[in-house]
Amino acid sequence: MAARSDSGVILPFPGELVMARFVRRYKRFLIDAVIENRPITAHANNTGSMLGLLRPGCTVGLSVSDNPKRKLAHTLEMTRVPDFRGDFWVGVNTLTPNRLFRRAFCAGAFPELAGYDTIRPEPVFAHGRLDFELTGPAGTCFVECKNVTMVEDNAAAFPDAATERGCKHLLELTRLAREGKCLAALFFCVQRPDGDCFAPAAMVDPEYAALFTEALAAGVLMLPYRADVSTAGITLADRLPLAGRY
């Protein structure tokens, strides 16, 4: 059973949100779209496959930056997905998990992290950086954040493309957990409403799934939380249980 969050934590979009009709994605980071019969090119920061989310003609939500130094003013935030139960939004901006986690943590929205009261971004580790370091009466906790946009067999699943970087993060979190000097946690931000539980996407990246299992056994705290996506912003919702085999 998912644990319901009553945090009411809402992350607004980083600029005005406009609706557009998706045309195509290319060079991984670019999309062409149409706003009121006006063609535009927008930035897409999601390096995953976004399988099934970007179909020609679908509606997408784009935030608009007022920074005059930006080459592209529009950023892809979400896409409208058809479903027999009713269409829904899926958030695809990979900066959202970090932004939402920080806002929710500062609001005290994670009961699992009640012993920590200070947050510092991008602490260094052996092979790069993790997303956050938390400190407080409970000690130290290192947190990595991931964006989840895929659902398979009623389970929200990560990753949607093989991820060497994600595997490195799992290895580091597992090492920290085994040393026993701090807590290591992984926040999965599930930006879609379907999916009753969470599981690593073994069909996409079996190495990641195997490392996930090792990390779980080592004591890494897995925090898959659903985020409700709407035109008003991104709201932290319920914590999803892990799939039965985990």
Image (cartoon, rainbow, N blue to C red):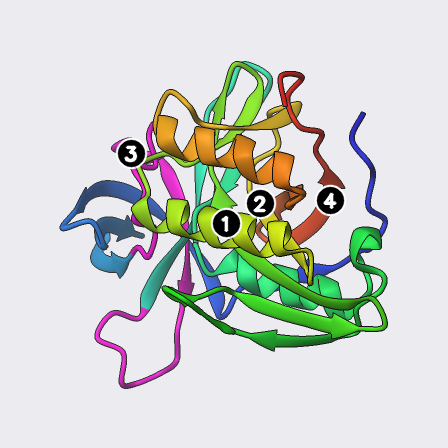
Prevailing secondary structure class for the magenta stretch in the rendered image: loop
Q: Earlier in the sequence, mark 2 or mark 3?
A: 3
Residue name at image x 26 percent, y 59 percent: 42
Assess whether mark 1 and mark 2 are in contact (beta carbons under 8 angstroms).
yes
Vertical arrangement, residue 133 with respect to residue 98, above or below: below
Residue, disc 3: 57
Q: Earlier in the sequence, mark 2 or mark 1?
A: 1
Q: Which mark is residue 213?
A: none
Q: Earlier in the sequence, mark 3 or mark 1?
A: 3
Q: Amino acid at mark 4?
A: Ala
Assess whether mark 3 and mark 2 are in contact (beta carbons under 8 angstroms).
no
Counting from the top left corner in percent of width and height, residue 134 is at: 68, 70
Camera-side mark, 2 or 3 = 2
Instruction: Write down the region rendered in magenta.
Output: 44-73
Q: Which mark is residue 146?
A: 1
Whether residue 50 is visible to the viewer of this picture, yes or no, is yes
Residue, disc 2: 188
In the rendered image, the quadrant that contains the N terminus is top right
Q: Amino acid at mark 3?
A: Gly
Answer few, some or many: residues within 10 Å of disc 1's Cα (few below 14, many 20 plus, some between 14 and 19). many
Counting from the top left corner in percent of width and height, residue 226 is at: 65, 40
- Furthest toward the front, the residue is 179
